[in-house]
Image: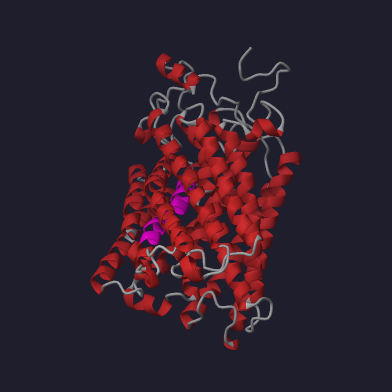
Amino acid sequence: MSHAVSANGEPRNYLNETYGIKSWLLTLDHKRIGILYLITLAVFFLVGSLFASLIRFELMTPKGDLVEAETYNKLFTMHGVVMIFFFLIPSIPAVLGNFLIPLQIGARDVAFPRLNLLSYYLYAAGGLFAVLAIIMGGIDTGWTFYTPYSSTYSTSFVSLALVGVFVNGFSSILTGVNFMVTIHKMRAPGMTWFRLPLFIWGHYATSLIQVLGTPVVAITLLLVCFERLFKIGIFDPNYGGDPVLFQHMFWFYSHPAVYIMILPGFAVVSEVIACFSRKRVFGYSFVAFSSLAIAVLGFLVWGHHLFVSGQSTYASMVFSFITFFIAVPTAIKIFNWSFTLHKASVKLDSPMLYVMGFIGLFTIGGLTGLFLSTLGIDIHLHDTYFVVAHFHYVMVGGMVMGFLCGLHFWWPKMTGRMYSEGAAKLGVMFVFAGFNLTFFPQFILGYLGMPRRYHAYPEEWQALNIMSTAGATVLGLGFSLTIVYLLWSLFKGEKAPANPFQAKGLEWDIPSPPTAHNFEAIPIVTWEAYPYGEEEPVEPSTEAVPERAKEDEVV
C-alpha cells in the first residue's frame, strides 16, 4: 500500500497523520509548524488590535478623557511591540514560508526539522515574556526602546519586554538559516535557480536580512538590559554613554526589518498575479534580482531615521540619496507586475483583489516615504502623524494585505477546504475601505503638525481623528469577518481539489491538504517557472535521482 494512503483508503495528509495535541506540539512536519505559527500569530494579532482600538477611542476627543497620559504611553508601546515583533515580522515567513518552501522546491521537509520546531518555541517563549510584561504593568518607552529613557528612567517592565524580543530574535535567525540551507541543498533535480518560483527568491532575500541583521538588534537590546540592570555606561550620557549610538545600532536592523515584512509580501503577490493573469511574470529575472537588491540596499539607509538627531549634513545627504535609490528595485516590481497584467484576462477572485489592494496601498506608502527621505521636508514631518500613516500604508497596506492574499490563495492547500468566495470579497472591501478611512486622514493631520504619541490635541483636529476612528471600526469589521469565514470553512467548507485556482507549481500537483511527506518520490523538474499560456508541462516524474531520494528519506 502506498505510504500516502491509510488502511481505510483515506489520504494520510499532514492534518490526520496522528491525533492528539502532543503530536502537534512535538511535530517535526514543516506544515504543522506553519499552522502552529498561524494560530499563535492570530492570538498576538488580536492582542495588538485591542491596544490599537483603545488608542483610536482615546483620540476621538481632544481631551485625554479615556486614559491617563502614562497609560496612553503604554498602549501605543504595547501595540507596537506586539504587532511588529510578534506579528508583522514573522507572519509570512513563519506561516507561508514554513508551509510552502519545501513544497515549491520539491523537498519533503526543511533542512533542519528539529531546528524548525525550536524556532517556533523560541518565538512563543519570547511572546510569553512580552505578554508577562504587559500583565505586570506594561511598557511605556515606545516600541523603539529609545535610550536613555528605556535604559535608565522608565519604571515600567522594560527588561521583560527586551528579553522577549531578544529571545524572539533567535527564532528569526534560526528560521533564516533553515530556509537558506533548504533552498540551497534540497531543491528537486532540475529545479535550477531560474526555475524557482519568485516566492522562493523573496524568502531567500528575507532570510539574508534575518541572518545578518537580527544579531545586531539582539545585541543592542541586550546592552540596554545591561545598562538598565548594572548601570554600565553605553547609551546613557550620565554614565559616559551616547544615546545616538543606540539609534544607529537599532535602525541598522530595524529599517531592513521593514523589508523582512515586505519582501515576503512581494513574493506572494508575484505568485498570485501569475496565476490570475495566466501569464509568466514579466521580467522574471529582474523581479528575482530586485529582491536581492532590496535586501542589500536595506542595510545602507538606516541614517534617514536620524536626520534630526544631530548627524552631519553630509551623512544625511548620502542616506537621503540611497533611500531614494532603493525605490528603484521596488519600482521594478511594481512596473513588472503592471506589465504582467497588461492585456491579460485577469480573474478577480479574492486573492487577486488583495493583490490590487496591495499594489495601490503600498505604492502610496512608498511614495510618501520619499517625502520623509527629503531632509527639509522631514524636519517638518518628523514625529508627526504623517509618519504613522506612511508606516501603516507600508506595513498594513503592504505586508498585511500580502499575508491575507497568500492566506486566501493557499488556504485550500493548507486545510483541504474552500472558503466562501462571496464573504471573502466582502471582507476585502471592508479591509480596503476601512484602512484608507483610518490612515489617509493621518497624512493630513501630520501635515498640519499633529505630533504622534500624544493623547490630547487641539480641537480643530477632532474631525479628522473621528474619521480615523470610524475607519478603524470598519477595518476591524473586515478583519473579524475574515476570521469568521475562514474558521467556518474548516467545518462547513467544501472539500478543496488539489488545484482549485489552476495554478502552476509543484505544491499544486499534490493533494489538498498535502500528504505527510509531501511527495511519494522527489519530482524531476523539466520546465521553467510559471508556464502559463504554454503547452502544458509533462507531469512531474516520480523517478527520483537515487542519491537525492535517499537524502530526502533521511530528512
Residue 256 colored in magenta in the image: yes
Q: Is residue 38 visible?
A: yes
Q: Residue at x 71, y 29 (%)?
A: 19
Spot occupied by residue 304 in the image (x, y as percentages of width and height): 35, 67
Q: Residue furthest left?
A: 314
Task: State whether residue 162 is above or below residue 417.
Answer: below
Q: Residue furthest top?
A: 1
Instruction: Say left or right for 481 vs 147.
Output: right
Q: Residue at x 45, y 67 (%)?
A: 146
Task: State whether residue 94 is above or below residue 157.
Answer: above
Residue 514 colored in magenta in the image: no
Q: How many marks?
A: 0
Q: Residue furthest bottom?
A: 459
Q: Camera-side residue: 82 or 460?
A: 82
Instruction: Say left or right for 288 vs 406.
Output: left
| Range drawn in magenta | 249-270
Q: Camera-side residue: 481 or 211?
A: 211
Color style of the picture: secondary structure
What is the quadrant of residue 475 in the picture? bottom right
Q: Quadrant of the N terminus?
A: top right
Q: Residue at x 71, y 16 (%)?
A: 7
Q: Residue at x 43, y 50 (%)?
A: 263
Spot occupied by residue 9 in the image (x, y as percentages of width and height): 70, 18
Spot occupied by residue 63 in the image (x, y as percentages of width and height): 64, 84
**Magenta part, dominant SS:** helix
What is the quadrant of residue 180 in the picture? top left
Q: Residue furthest front?
A: 230
Q: Camera-side residue: 6 or 524?
A: 6
Q: Is residue 390 visible?
A: no
Spot occupied by residue 78 in the image (x, y as percentages of width and height): 58, 63
